Image (cartoon, rainbow, N blue to C red):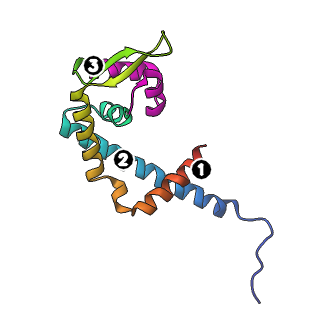
Amino acid sequence: MAERRDAVADPVAEGQIDRDVCKLVHRFTQKLDVHVRAVADELGLTPTQVIALRELSDPITARELARRMVCEASNATFVLDRLEHQGLIERQPHPTDRRAKRIVLTPAGERRRANVLERLNAHSPLAALSPAQQESLRDLLQALVT
């Protein structure tokens, strides 16, 4: 005689997918962190500077950069101070908000950003996936965080 499944699911078994996903996301995050650190070491930057340059795709405020980097505005300001000291960014008046400054890459910053992007893409942990799989992963993760 076949064994009947209880109408109530086993909470231990139900939590297995959650635990597996948490472990896999954590391991993937660690791989991304190692990759960013390797690129930073190669280019003589800090990992946070690499992330800032990656996110500076267009002129934005420090507050927007902090949002993109998922950090406090004061942390973004510290990174921007260092990038400005290196001649990679300029702070320019915002065209519509007198209180804000726009962060703009200098020509040297544009070149450094291109190097950062090239190196980040060269051996990315995402390279193990096809472009379609990368898009699917992005879409699944986006669904989880919105």
Q: Residue furthest top?
A: 98
Label 1 crowd (10 A; few <14 / some 14-19 / many >=20)? few
Q: Residue at image x 23%, y 34%?
A: 112
Q: Quadrant of residue 38?
A: top left
Q: Quadrant of residue 10?
A: bottom right
Q: Is residue 48 left or right of residue 73?
A: left
Residue type, mark 3 in image: Glu
Q: Quadrant of residue 17?
A: bottom right
**Residue 99 among magenta residues:** no
Which numbered disc, 2 or 3, marks the residue that appears first in the sequence?
A: 2
Q: Position of residue 50 (x, y in %)?
A: 30, 35
**Residue 14: which disc?**
none
- Identify the residue under disc 2: 32
- Identify the residue under disc 3: 84
105 or 142: which is nearer to us? 105
Residue bounds of the magenta highlight: 58-83
Q: Position of residue 125 (x, y in %)?
A: 34, 54
**Residue 143: which disc?**
1
Q: Position of residue 126 (x, y in %)?
A: 37, 55
Which numbered disc, 3 or 1, marks the residue that appears first in the sequence?
A: 3
Q: Residue at image x 55%, y 48%?
A: 142
Secondary structure of residue under mark 1? helix
